[in-house]
Every structure is written in C-alpha cells, then in structure tokens.
Image (tube, grey):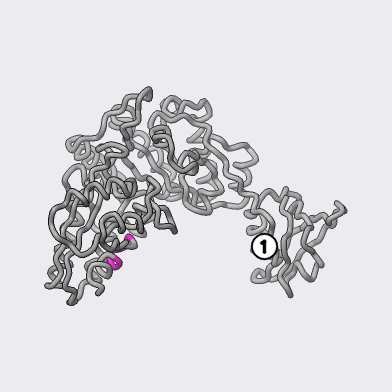
Amino acid sequence: MLKISSVEKNSVGSELRLKKGYEVLSFDGYPACDVIDYLYYDSRDAFTLCVADANGKEFEFEIEKDEDETLGLSFEDDGLEMKTCYNNCIFCFVDQMPKGLRPTLYIKDDDYRQSFLCGNFVTLTNLTENDVERIVRYKLSPLYVSVHTMNGQLRERMMNNRFAGKITEYLTRFAAAEILINTQIVLVPGVNDGDELDYSARELFKLFPYVHTLAVVPCGITKYREGLYSIEDANPDYCRGVIEQVDRLNSEFGTNFVTLADEFYFKAGLNVKPFEFYGEFPQIENGVGMTAKFLRELEESLEPRECERTLLIAIGTSAEGFIRGCAKMVEEHCKSLKTHVIGVENKFFGSTVNCSGLLTGRDILAAVKAFDKPYDALVIPCNTLREFEEVFLCGMTVSELSKEIDKPVLVTDGTGEGFFEVLTSK
C-alpha cells in the first residue's frame, strides 16, 4: 500500500478530495505495491482507483482524465524496499570484498524494479509469477539481465540456484511482450566461455531485436578469494581470443549484437572499437564503449589553450596507456601544460583488479608519494569516488588526500570534455 503524504493543489487527486494519511490500495483491481504502480496508472487516461481513509473506510473512483493530467500524489514511502539476491555465484564480487567497508558495499541487490528504474543488472532468479505478470502488464522496458549462460544446467551450477535454469523461459516471455532487454555475461575462463559463449550468444540472438544487446565483461578477481571457486585471471592471449570470437559472432549475426567491456582490449594490448561500433552506447555503464566515447568527446573539445602548470594524473593500471595518450593530445593544444601519468597498483583488492573505479584513496596516496618529480596538482577520475560524494572506497576523502600530499586534487567528470577542461583550466 502507498500512504499519501501530500496532494498537489488543482490536481485530479485534490478534486477527488484525497488527503494526507489516505492509503492507495489498488489500481484496476491490482494491489498498489510501490510507486511504479502509481507512475504507470498516473500516465493513463482511464482506470479504477481504490483508496482507504484514515479510519480504514474504502472508496473506489472511476478515473477519466487527460494523459497530461496527474493525480498529484506524493507518498510517505515509495515501497521500493530492495529485493536481494538468492544466488551464490562462483564469481560474485561481493564475496571477494574484505571486511570493514561501508555496509552498502555488501548488499547483493537483485531487484527487477531497480533494473527498470536505474539500469541495475538482475538475474531474474527471485521472480514470482506475479512479478513476471507485472513486468509484462506494465511493459517495464528496458530491463538489464545478467544471463551468464543460456545453458540452463550450467547456469544453475554457476549461480548455485535451482531456479536459474528458467532464463530462457523468462526472456522468451518478455521478448514476446516486446520488452527491450540488455543482457550481460560475466565471462569465467574455462566455465562459460568458448563453445558455451557461442551457444549463449546464438540463443540470445534468436530473440533479437527485443534482446537488444549482449555485453561480455571480465570476471573481477580480488586477492580475497580464499575458500571460493578457483578462477584464473584472463591473460592477454585469452583476451585476444575472446575478441576474435566476438568478431566472428557479430560477422555471423550481421550486426554488432555482442560487445565487449573495454577491459578486454586493454588487457589484450589492442585498441577498442571505433565510436560508431557502439551505436547509442546502451551498455556504457557496464564498461562497454566508455573509452571510444571518451576519446570522441576529447577530440571534439581540443582547442588552443594557455595553462602553465604541471599535473600528475593518477589512474588504474589498465587505462594508464590510454590516458597517457589522451594527456599528450591535450599537451599538443596547450604548449605550456606538462603532464605525468601514473598507473596506481591496487594493493587493497590485489593487482588483478586494475580498473580506476576500484582504486582506494590510500593506494592513490602511496603511488603519489612514491612519485619523485615536481607537480602542481593531482588529477583523479570521478569513478574512484562514491557517487555524489568525495569519498573513496576506503573512507578517505578528497580533502584528506589533498592535505596528505599538500597539493590540490582535481576531479574529472568522466567525460573527454571534462578531462580537457580540468587539465587546461587556470
């Protein structure tokens, strides 16, 4: 149920004399579970609304309104309490986290509503039949689904969940309802790669275009895997083989259906695909196409500037070469600028974790203190920090890092344009 906290003046809700403290019970006879129900029906022009007043007396209204009119209701709670994961995946990154970090880092979310609202990847293993019917009825699209394999038996073993094998059934039903689905496979060497990857890609492509994309991402391996399933880190030869395999699959499909996380290209020592390859970048939050987009944005931002200073840029080791090349491009347009780039070894999680997004402030601090050339300010990427806050994974703040090195710390916004502006702004 949704308890009303306020009613907008001159709205349909105010005309119905709905008040603070009333509870929305149902729409068209379907229980009002969370704010998604409200948003769906508030966008429609005709439906039945059932509410209860503060004394529990129920009222039913037949609503007819223009689509741009609103009920104007706000609620005490959105009803979106997080649905958690029922799996015990052999590659789970949360299981590889050390103790003592902030509690939110240990939450294993697996909520189809957050998949629709925020683009979170979900496994669908905790769905009830009511959930499936609701997804279809509301056409919640797009959804982001962690497939990992289309081999039902293998998926059950990888996720240690006897319900995991229903993936084909769910995806087929959603595709039939014309729900757009972006999928991913976390690639575990020797488990769901090779022939299994071919099989999964081909099975998913049968549901194209509603299964819109398949992203293949590397399995993250930290040094905290004691007692867990043994997984080998992907070496350069392995990554080159995966790239060649995906190229063959896309040639077979006649479209760029399968995309790889940029990390595969970094590890293979190869350039990522060109900007045009990624289309509208539907999986950029999954690390797919970020490099190509960044480079295009940087190239379009380049212009002559004057900024006489020396900057030290700290980055994850995987992107060190790429960022060094980008910094040189900026230097060519700002002759008075000098840059140094250091790849920061991830001692917190282990050297097998080499992306910038999992760097801690303490590892950055150690790398910067070991750097022995003069510089005026330190530059770090925004993805090293908690969203909307200047706090690293380890709890150190940007201001604390700045105080430790006695230098300003400049944070880029993750775009090529922002990179150019931070490096060249006076």
Location of the C terminus (image quadrant): bottom left
For mark 1, what is the residue? Answer: 42
Question: Disc 1 residue type?
Answer: Asp
Q: What residue sits 17% from the left and 62% below the top?
A: 375
The secondary structure making up most of the magenta span is helix
Which sits in the foreground, 33 or 342?
342
Residue 334 drawn at (x, y percent): 15, 72
Q: What residue sits 27% from the left and 49% below the top?
A: 364
In the picture, measured across the screen, residue 149 lies left or right of residue 325, that is right
Residue 28 drawn at (x, y percent): 74, 53
Up-down relation of residue 154 to residue 131 (above or below): above
Residue 155 drawn at (x, y percent): 43, 29
Magenta-span inclusion, residue 417: yes
Residue 129 is drawn in which quadrant? top right
Residue 390 drawn at (x, y percent): 40, 57
Which sits in the foreground, 371 or 34?
371
In the picture, measured across the screen, residue 398 lies left or right of residue 70, that is left
Which sits in the foreground, 208 or 46?
46
Total of numbered circles in the picture? 1
| First to last magenta residue range | 414-418
For label 1, the SS is helix
